[in-house]
Image (cartoon, rainbow, N blue to C red):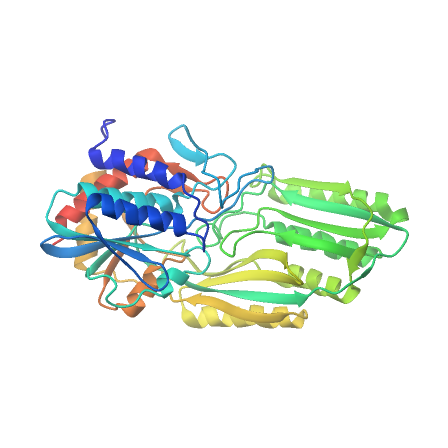
Amino acid sequence: MSTILSDTQQLVWQIFDEICQIPRPSGKEEKIMNYLREFALKHGFLTRTDKAGNIVMIRPGKQPAIAMQAHTDMVCEKRGDSTHNFETDALQTYIEEGWMKAKGTTLGADNGIGVAMALAAMVTYPGDRQLEGLFTVEEETGLSGASAVEAGFISAPVLLNLDSEDENELIVGCAGGCETVGYWKVEEMPAPEGMFPIEITIKGLLGGHSGSDIHLPRANANQLLGRFLQQTAQKYPFFLCSLAGGGLHNAIAREANALFLVPYADREHIRIDWNIYIAEQEDQWLAHEPKMRMDLSSRPKQEKVFVPELTNQLIQALCTCPHGVVKMSDTMQGVVETSTNLASIKRVDDNIVITTSQRSSFEDQLNALAFQTYTLLTDCGAMAGIHNGYPAWEPQFDTPLLKTAKEVYKQVWNKQPEVKIIHAGLECGLFSKVMPNLNILSFGPTLLGVHSPDERLNMASTNQTTVFLMQLLANLS
């Protein structure tokens, strides 16, 4: 590929840089949506906005329309030492060995680079075809924007979703999913006398996307924390003060911490137990988690602790909630069919909330796994609920769209693409549900470390994927 970038490729990077200056956490996308309206006005495009805040941008043309789609929000994850404020601060991007990254935070190329590619294509496409850009909100927190899209919001019979993360793949199907959440009312009592406060922290794990990375050998910080708390509570008088871990429902937990009290006389025994536990976990995980850190420190005197019943229930839930692959596909080698993620534990006002997420290519398996998790959480004393369900995108392997895409891919990359179903959730399932005649294909440049501060975007892949997008637009009839 030539090192001289085309006008479209240059515009992709210019727009993506502008997007990186705009704070856009899920649910707070007003600034990026205003940017899109101003972009449309500048280039003479039309826009429509629906009740959820999704925008469709229209470049009028004579030939039948093609839609390109991307979501505007980003996963907001940062390293423990980062002071970045995702609601006010621009991302600090940099380039290292051909990869674009952000300092201490997620990059937001999921799915900001898809937005940039769609906008650049709408500006530079040389033909007279009508192009539509569908830009959705709140994808990362439950696909609520896509859930609100109604039939007729776009007119195109073909939709190109730009939210995939491997240049080698053309995606034609994805898993459905939901969140199963447990809520415990916080009940506290005065801290007993003669107790020593200890905080344990687990950090530096790789984490990652709970769909595309769930099959990889990655530790879950919530699981590691729960297991140590369980063995400690079984050996010593034990009082829990606070508990937190993980972040978003679709990210594998990278960090977790707990503050608890043990008898002053047992403080050194706890340190010994902790060191033994560290050694055991390093034997299991260090080859896969080279930056794993497990720390223990003393803390100031605590005034309140959770009541014993609540402590026992929370530890039981952390230790019994499953995490990882439940079943691999019998028909597609290497594809996860069903999985669950022990995503986060947080204090929200007067509640402790444990969030898990389930995914499956089959609705019956998804429902069964969600109900199993619901039952487990209620057995641990929680009020539980199943939320934010979304359908699987059922694959179609024999369409004119896919045939044309494979031909163009071979021209651009000089190799055959992998046609795949992925375990990560895409908005495509929701679009196909309300627009069953819509032909959909998903692709995108190579992204690694998605949903973690290790997120990085391959720049050469982005340039080549832009070439593919433009050629595909030209070849589709």
- Using the rendered view, name the quadrant where residue 51 is placed: bottom left
Q: State the quadrant of the C terminus.
A: bottom left
Q: Is residue 390 left or right of residue 78?
A: left
- Using the rendered view, name the quadrant where residue 355 is placed: bottom right
Q: Is residue 470 left or right of residue 117?
A: left
Reply above or below: 329 against 209: below
Reply above or below: 99 against 171: above
Q: State the quadrant of the N terminus.
A: top left
Residue at (63, 53) in percent of width and height: 222
Q: In the image, residue 96 lies at what x, y percent?
A: 42, 28
Q: In the image, residue 172 lies at what x, y percent?
A: 29, 57
Q: Is residue 375 left or right of residue 110?
A: right
Report whether residue 361 is seen: yes
Q: Is residue 280 left or right of residue 393?
A: right
Residue at (31, 48) in percent of width and height: 36
Report whether residue 469 is seen: no
Observer-nearest of 108 and 406:
108
Observer-nearest of 246 and 60:
60
Q: In the image, residue 317 lies at what x, y percent?
A: 66, 63
